[in-house]
Image (cartoon, rainbow, N blue to C red):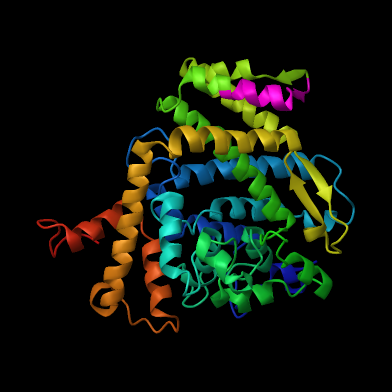
């Protein structure tokens, strides 16, 4: 199938022409546009779990994204290329590794400064004006904000955009009460036309199922490529955040091993080829750095090799019918590490909460001040984009790194800080 006849290689702006002697595939071109984009570079200055400027060891959003790519690409090669994929899926595997790479590199582009605390702060300011959510902002960056084209971001192919769409539900589909609680998993109504174009190759039945909210008002489905990216993300953040937290001495060995023993006593040991994973093995994390790294690698390997391709016969299209899933026992362990260890013993501790609240306060104050006189305070405010004032301010703040947000805050509110010659 040629690029011209493959709907998944089409771009929203189809007037774009290929450069002379450009031998790359359409999907590879998408990957290059993400890697060379400003939004990707800014991930180096954005909080993952701990602040981006707190040390030189732990992960930032950028290094996390690189690790997600390595895991995601390995999952693709190991689970789809080397194993026997279903015959109806086979036509969609050619060059799909580049799609997975792009999805993994791009999956966190939309996260604002100061991590999930920053995300909640922006949503509180935007909930009556279309909301704010990290993945929705990623879609917006790829299709409108990244400076590769004048109007369409990197103008991604249909399949690349589908691979990054984690939540195929519009913000307007949520009940008002749900919108106000916390950032709902969604895309913005401003991108509804682009999402409609994206889903055009699917049958009406597939589209109706794919975009429906569950009874708990949550998105239920994602594409094959997005499922691989999400598996890689889940594996990366649970294991690497654990490694970072141990290395920075946030976690007490006796408490963590005790917590894990409770988990394994309740859920049983996790059986794997050649043995089983037990709580006492996690003691390796608290040994020297070599043994800690080897155990982290072992944990990543267990999580990767126990994934499996699952079929949902409610869908007719292979890109929706098949998803990569993490083994149920492993998913329970990932959720335990994330919710009961990292959240309880790191994120919710007073010393981290102070920083999170400070970041939220910075974002809210910036939003309020910029809203009062955006024409005077934001460069290129009158750029001709026909969107609301609130959305433009939200885009501006969401694109900041942690340090840039602090710099602008100090420039506006801290006496003695900032001069007219400061680089901004």
Furthest toward the left, the residue is 416
> Along the horizontal axis of the image, is 282 left or right of 57?
right
Q: Is residue 261 magenta?
A: yes
| 211, above or below 309, in the image | below
Taking the spot 24% from the left edge, 59% from the top edge, the residue there is 409
> Along the horizontal axis of the image, is 52 left or right of 179?
left
Taking the spot 55% from the left edge, 60% from the top edge, the residue there is 135
| 384, above or below 392, in the image | below
Taking the spot 29% from the left edge, 63% from the top edge, the residue there is 365
Magenta-colored segment: predominant secondary structure: helix
Residue 412: % across, % down: 19, 63
| Residue 12 in view | no
Residue 94: % across, % down: 76, 55
Taking the spot 77% from the left edge, 70% from the top edge, the residue there is 207
Residue 5: % across, % down: 77, 73
Residue range of the region highlighted in magenta in the rendering: 259-273
Furthest toward the front, the residue is 177
> Along the horizontal axis of the image, is 306 left or right of 337?
right
Q: Is residue 136 magenta?
A: no
């Amino acid at each position: 199938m040629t690029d011209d006849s493959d709907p998944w290689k089409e771009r929203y702006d189809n007037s774009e022409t290929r450069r002379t002697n450009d031998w790359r595939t359409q999907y590879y071109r998408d990957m290059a546009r993400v890697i060379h984009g400003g939004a990707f570079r800014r991930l180096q200055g954005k909080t993952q779990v701990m602040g981006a400027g707190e040390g030189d060891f732990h992960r930032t959003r950028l290094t996390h994204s690189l690790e997600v790519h390595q895991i995601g690409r390995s999952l693709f090669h190991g689970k789809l290329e080397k194993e026997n994929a279903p015959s109806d899926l086979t036509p969609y595997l050619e060059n799909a590794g580049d799609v997975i790479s792009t999805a993994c590199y791009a999956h966190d582009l939309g996260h604002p400064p100061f991590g999930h605390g920053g995300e909640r702060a922006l949503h509180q300011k935007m909930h009556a004006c279309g909301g704010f959510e990290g993945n929705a902002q990623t879609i917006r960056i790829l299709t409108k904000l990244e400076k590769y084209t004048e109007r369409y971001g990197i103008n991604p192919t249909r399949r690349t955009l589908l691979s990054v769409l984690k939540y195929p539900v519009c913000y307007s589909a949520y009940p008002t009460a749900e919108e106000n609680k916390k950032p709902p998993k969604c895309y913005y109504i401003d991108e509804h036309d682009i999402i409609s174009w994206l889903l055009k190759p699917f049958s009406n039945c597939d589209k109706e199922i794919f975009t429906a909210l569950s009874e708990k008002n949550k998105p239920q489905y994602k594409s094959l490529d997005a499922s691989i990216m999400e598996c890689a993300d889940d594996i990366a953040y649970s294991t690497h955040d654990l490694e970072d937290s141990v290395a920075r001495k946030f976690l007490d060995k006796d408490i963590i091993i005790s917590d894990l023993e409770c988990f394994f006593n309740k859920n049983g040991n996790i059986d794997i080829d050649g043995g089983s994973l037990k709580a006492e093995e996690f003691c390796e994390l608290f040994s020297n750095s070599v043994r800690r790294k080897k155990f982290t690698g072992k944990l990543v390997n267990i999580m990767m090799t126990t994934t499996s391709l699952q079929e949902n016969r409610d869908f007719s299209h292979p890109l929706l019918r098949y998803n990569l899933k993490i083994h149920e026992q492993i998913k329970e362990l990932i959720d335990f590490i994330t919710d009961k260890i990292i959240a309880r013993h790191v994120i919710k501790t007073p010393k981290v909460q102070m920083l999170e609240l400070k970041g939220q306060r910075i974002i809210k104050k910036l939003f309020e001040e910029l809203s009062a006189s955006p024409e005077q305070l934001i460069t290129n405010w009158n750029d001709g984009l026909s969107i609301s004032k609130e959305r433009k301010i939200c885009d501006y703040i969401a694109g900041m790194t942690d340090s840039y947000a602090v710099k602008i805050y100090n420039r506006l509110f801290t006496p003695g800080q900032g001069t007219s010659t400061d680089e901004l």
